């Protein structure tokens, strides 16, 4: 996706450097001009690439249900879709974890599924 | 008892989107609530696999079948982001879900199903203190539950499709760059933090 850059003269940049730096995160990079011509771009730091070996290990641990998505996200900053790609690229499966419930909670869950089945039947 | 289905993180949404199965969320016939914080996590980077599909699904089904639940957690996050753009969303999806849950439970005769990504159902601490009218489930358990009532045919097939980097068009397009992004040889190169 292409975003047009903000533009500022070098003398404006010099006098407002603090504000300019603070604005990079929310407004993105800014082009600096001198005598009407672009001479440089001030931009936020590039995101660090995720180490492939580390991500492979995290995907394996995730696949086994040993760590949560939040833990992966916190360490790597990737999206959940990226984790799916990491799993698939190593022929790993999504974890399958059954939640612990009290007998009453279990009863409610069964009722919900039974009601869904019944209403589906009525709709057919 | 009137139940709603609260989606507690982006995991179930992205999994089902990539597997082209988001509508299974509506099969129990419960109102679906996506906390605003969770929606934000999903749509923060629309170039990621499944993100556009979830955004479009939410737009199409809101407010009839799905509500985006407003939370103070999200408001606070946005405020912090305006001060420091590098503020992380760390655990805020779950906190937002907890805030919505508490609001739902304030109503009489109300309960909730909390849908988590699988690994989280073992780790989230507040799950051990939930009242009986709150039912926790994971993406896979939810799918197998629907399959057990013959509401869907193949739960395992959906879970496999979500990680099928060769056969699944959404993932294949993402990897080869035909979704408009640059193609890459090494899948790990694409995993830049959002």
Image (tube, rainbow, N blue to C red):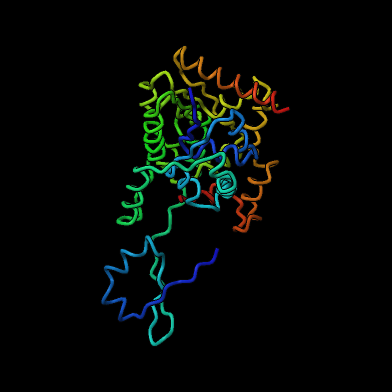
Q: Is residue A60 visible?
A: yes
Q: Position of residue B193 (x, y in %)?
A: 45, 50
Q: Position of residue A109 (x, y in %)?
A: 53, 20
In this rendered view, identify the residue nearer to me: B25 or A119: A119
Which quarter of the picture shows residue B178? bottom right
Which quarter of the picture shows residue B27? top right
Q: Is residue B187 visible?
A: no
- Above or below, comparing residue A43 to residue A13 in the picture: above
Q: Position of residue A16 (x, y in %)?
A: 27, 73
- Above or below, comparing residue B150 to residue B160 in the picture: above
In this rendered view, identify the residue nearer to me: A61 or B29: B29
Q: Position of residue A98 (x, y in %)?
A: 51, 21
- Above or below, comparing residue A93 to residue B70 in the picture: above
- Furthest-bottom residue in this view: A35
The number of numbered badges drawn on the structure is: 0
In this rendered view, identify the residue nearer to me: B99 or B29: B29
At x 30% / y 81%, what residue is drawn?
A11
In this rendered view, identify the residue nearer to me: B89 or B177: B89
At x 60% / y 19%, what residue is drawn?
A114
A55 left or right, relative to B184: left
B10 left or right, relative to B56: left
- Furthest-right residue in this view: A124
A31 left or right, relative to B170: left
At x 67% / y 30%, what residue is drawn?
B157
């Amino acid at each position: 996706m292409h975003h047009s850059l903000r533009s500022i003269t070098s003398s404006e940049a010099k006098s407002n450097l603090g504000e300019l730096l603070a604005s990079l995160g929310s407004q993105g990079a800014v082009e600096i001009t001198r005598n009407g011509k672009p001479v440089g771009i001030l931009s936020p730091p590039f995101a660090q690439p995720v180490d492939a070996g580390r991500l492979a290990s995290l995907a394996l641990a995730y696949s086994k249900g040993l760590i949560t998505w939040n833990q992966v996200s916190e360490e790597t900053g990737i999206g959940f879709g990226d984790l799916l790609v990491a799993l698939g690229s190593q022929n790993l499966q999504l974890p399958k974890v059954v939640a612990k419930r009290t007998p009453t909670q279990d009863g409610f869950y069964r009722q919900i599924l039974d009601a869904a089945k019944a209403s589906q039947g009525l709709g057919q | 008892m009137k139940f709603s289905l609260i989606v507690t993180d982006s995991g179930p949404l992205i999994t089902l989107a990539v597997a082209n199965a988001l509508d299974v969320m509506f099969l129990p016939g419960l109102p679906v609530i996506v906390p605003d914080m969770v929606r934000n996590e999903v749509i923060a980077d629309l170039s990621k696999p499944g993100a556009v599909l979830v955004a479009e699904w939410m737009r199409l089904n809101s407010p009839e079948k799905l509500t985006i639940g407003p939370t103070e957690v999200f408001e606070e996050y946005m405020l912090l982001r305006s001060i420091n753009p590098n503020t992380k969303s760390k655990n805020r999806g779950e906190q937002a879900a907890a805030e919505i849950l508490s609001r739902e439970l304030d109503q009489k005769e109300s309960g909730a199903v909390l849908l988590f990504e699988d690994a989280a159902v073992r780790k989230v601490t507040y799950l051990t203190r939930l009242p009986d009218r709150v039912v926790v489930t994971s993406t896979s358990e939810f799918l197998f539950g629907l399959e057990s009532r013959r509401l869907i045919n193949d739960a395992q097939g959906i879970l496999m499709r979500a990680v099928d980097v060769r056969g699944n068009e959404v993932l294949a397009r993402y990897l080869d760059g035909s979704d408009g992004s640059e193609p890459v040889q090494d899948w790990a190169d694409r995993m830049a933090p959002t």
